[in-house]
Image: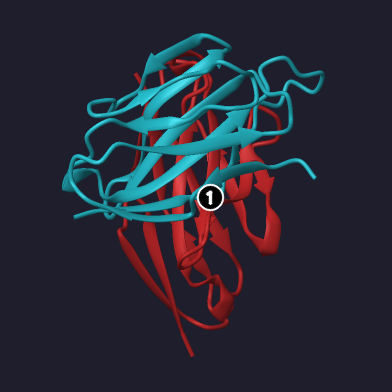
Amino acid sequence: EAQVTQNPRYLITVTGKKLTVTCSQNMNHEYMSWYRQDPGLGLRQIYYSMNVEVTDKGDVPEGYKVSRKEKRNFPLILESPSPNQTSLYFCASIPIYTRSGSHEQYFGPGTRLTVT
Amino acid sequence: AQSVTQLDSHVSVSEGTPVLLRCNYSSSYSPSLFWYVQHPNKGLQLLLKYTSAATLVKGINGFEAEFKKSETSFHLTKPSAHMSDAAEYFCVVSDQGSGYALNFGKGTSLLVTP
């Protein structure tokens, strides 16, 4: 089944304790991205990657890092989490090169992070 | 630059009555437009998308949206609301200027009353 998976789905942590949220897709998509969702703000893009070893900042990159060493994986790293990073996080992937020309985004199930 | 505005943060309808969720967009290019739905404590589900084909787009669960370039609008409608339609709805725009990034509206919360 074509899907985007995220782990963990729920995480409660303390300020300053480094954490990684994993994202993996099995569709061989080139483009992957991370969004955070906050009440009243919709979803905002954190980082994106056009392909392996190619990453770039989105609209709200402060406090986050990413890496893209393999095509299927795009982990989100919070080196020193703070309470303002409490949010719902979504990973997404898109096929860039498609026969149909459709660039529909496929979303993961979300990771709810609480930083105390 | 692209942007999207959802004109209502909350909409309340009675079961069986029509639903209208309003969305205006701006884009310097030919946009792709989407509506996503998010049920409580659930992920995002694509309802429908417009990508420069037919201006009237039909989606899942009886929803449809019409792309009106002259009005820069992409309103979501459904003839008859069902209790299960209660959810958060997001209008989303993407264009070639943004790469493949999606620009989300702030969401409209739909309440359906018996």
Residue A73 in percent (x, y) is at 59, 27
**Residue pictured at 49% horizontal, 72% vertical:** B86
The answer to whether residue B8 of the structure is visible from this angle is yes
Left or right relative to B17: residue B9: left
Label 1 crowd (10 A; few <14 / some 14-19 / many >=20): some
Outermost bottom residue: B114
**Residue pictured at 49% horizontal, 54% vertical:** A9
- Please state which of residues B25 and B37 is positioned toward the viewer in this rendering: B37
- Please state which of residues B105 and A9 is positioned toward the viewer in this rendering: A9
Residue under pointer 1: B36
Q: Is residue B21 above or below residue B106?
A: below
**Residue pictured at 47% horizontal, 67% vertical:** B87
Outermost top residue: A53
**Residue pictured at 65% horizontal, 44% vertical:** B56
| Colouring used for the render | by chain
- Please state the total of marks drawn on the protein image: 1
The cyan-tinted chain is A
- Please state which of residues A82 and B17 is positioned toward the viewer in this rendering: A82
Q: Chain of mark 1?
A: B
Left or right relative to B22: residue A69: right
The answer to whether residue B6 of the structure is visible from this angle is no
The red-tinted chain is B
